[in-house]
Amino acid sequence: SLPGATIINRRHYHPNGDPPRILITGSLGQLGTGLAALLRKKYGDESVIMSDIVKPTKEIWQSGPYVFADILDFKCLQDIVVTYRIDWLVHFSALLSAIGEQNVPLAIRVNIEGMHNIMELSKQYGLRVFVPSTIGAFGPDSPRDITPNVCIQRPRTIYGVSKVHAELLGEYYHYKFGLDFRCLRFPGVISSDTQPGGGTTDYAVQIFHNAIAGEEFECYLKPNTRLPMMYIDDCLRALWEMLIAPTEKLKRRTYNVTAMSFTPAEVVAEVQKHFPNLKVSYRPDDRQQIADSWPQVLDDSEARNDWGWRHNHDLANMCDIMFARLRAAHA
Ligand code: AKB
């Protein structure tokens, strides 16, 4: 049989109806806290182990298990998987597009070498593993409007290159060793309680904070730069639905998912319905070139057809929720 084939379909969860035990790496980033809360509601606080290399706040530390995990340290990861009897792994640790360009060697270590550890670890312990990919995995040679699930991928950022590598490596381990690898290509994600760190789509979060603080907003992208986007609640639900999708429904292991596409000018117009006095200026920087190489509209019809993906939030509705949540947080 194939090397590693013994891990196929070995599942330690649900034999007695036990919930899966889930490790989240890089869990203090934009998506981790929200995902941990969602999974803890479904499977219980003790079933979800948050991890990162950063010291957590008291609130995080009190919300459930939290451990130190350096994804570049294989033994450290093995220790956690064994000690906490992990079944599923959600691997968030990564440097995003803009910050990756500022420190390419670090991005290679974290995004590429880290991914090697995650694949070997998941193979060794028979884990189901979710790794997010991104619209940044496409490049100027990809069709930009609209971008299908399978097309030319020649990204021009180290982030994009590392995510194509992650998609290909995960699919390779799936076909070669039976690894239960699952991956979604996310658009820019907009959230009120957590900040993105160093991406090209960050402006679409920052504008809400400036508006509510009564500050002027300077946008680093041109007003007509269209990019795919998604509200965090849709993003986390997509992730969970992909995580639990029955194997027979998955016709592939990497899917595009999206909710909307908008330009800075369009989000400004929508935000100004709430804050008519918001002042906006545009000063494009290096991130413009990155955005210009990315999809404008993502085709996620395969996710919709194969496992029933549906988004709930559009631009207007997302703005209402963002301001309601930010106001509640500031009250
Ligand atoms: C980034 O802008 O780098 C991320 C992404 C779209 O993957 N938000």
Image (tube, rainbow, N blue to C red):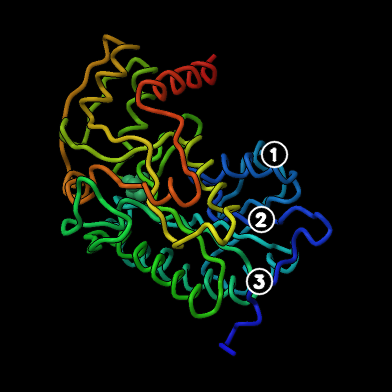
Q: Residue at x 56, y 56 (%)?
A: 90
Disc ID at residue 22:
2
Q: Is residue 256 left or right of residue 238?
A: left
In this rendering, position of residue 46 left or right of residue 286: right
How far apart are labels 2 and 1 at the CA level?
Answer: 13 Å
> In front of the other: label 1 or label 3?
3
Element type at mark 1 = helix
- Give whichever of discs 2 and 1 has the lower sequence position: 2
Res. 9 mark = 3
The answer for how far apart the CA atoms under marks 1 and 3 are is 26 Å
Residue drawn at point x = 30 percent, y = 12 percent: 273
Cβ atoms under marks 1 and 3 closer than 8 Å: no
Measure how far apart labels 2 and 3 are at the Cα level.
17 Å
Left or right of 5, for residue 305: left
Rate crowding at label 1 as few (under 14), some (14 to 19) or many (20 or more) other CA atoms within 10 Å: few
| Local secondary structure at mark 2 | strand
Whole-percent x and y of residue 171?
Answer: 44, 70
Q: Amino acid at mark 3?
A: Asn
Q: Is residue 198 visible?
A: no
Task: Say above or below: 184 vs 58.
Answer: below
The residue that appears at 53% across and 58% down in the rendered structure is 130
Residue at the (18%, 37%) spot, across then down: 225
Q: In the picture, residue 142 is in which quadrant?
A: bottom left
Which of the marked residues, 2 or 3, is nearer the chain's N terminus?
3
Specify the quadrant of the image occupied by residue 82: bottom right
- Which residue is labeled 1 in the image? 41
Q: Nearer the viewer, residue 163 or 312?
A: 312
With respect to residue 45, does 53 lie above or below? below
The residue under label 2 is which amino acid type?
Ile
**Residue 46, percent across and down?**
76, 49
| Disc 3 element | loop
